[in-house]
Amino acid sequence: MSAPKQRVRLFAAGQAMFRLVRADKGYGGPYGQNRMPAKWMCIDCGRIIDGTDDAPDTRFNKWSGKHDNQCARNGHAPCAHCGKKLPRLNDGCPRAHNWRTCPGKAEDSRMVAQHTRPGHQPRVNP
């Protein structure tokens, strides 16, 4: 007899979708003092955050009107050089990888600032 198929648990928070990677394990460690919360992964960029079995820890701050998690707050945009999805900056601009880690960037684009590409909209203070 085979084991029952596990359901994929999804949770939409703000502008991101999260998937449950590991369930809550309570307390663990050598003396039971370490909390081992559930792990949730962003479907777009792969960022892993903690949470409960029901939802990831993407608190909505009622005073600022925004989520505390970067993925849920700003959404995602592809890197201009390699195309991998990354969380947007706080002003809504697309992010780019570091020149050492991005496969699409050369050493020539190492010193190019984030907001100097043509067609960039001016920054808006949140």
Image: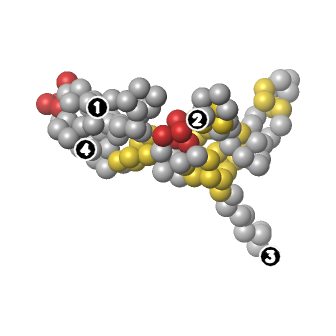
Q: Is residue 34 visible?
A: yes
Please identify, in this view, whether the residue under mark 4 or under mark 1 is nearer the observer. 1
Q: Determine whether, in the image, residue 66 is placed left or right of residue 90.
A: right
The answer to whether residue 100 shows anywhere in this view is: no
Q: CA distance from mark 4 to mark 1?
A: 21 Å
Camera-nearest label, 3 or 2: 2
Query: Residue at 58% across / 46% down in the picture?
Result: 14
- Element at label 2: strand
**How many callouts does the rendering have?**
4
The vertical placement of 56 against 101, above or below, is: below
Q: Position of residue 36 (x, y in %)?
A: 76, 34
Q: Earlier in the sequence, mark 3 or mark 2?
A: 3
Amino acid type, label 4 = His
In the image, which disc is placed on residue 1? 3
Of 124 and 105, nearer the camera is 124
Label pair 3/1, CB-CB below 8 angstroms: no
Q: Write down the residue under mark 2.
A: 66
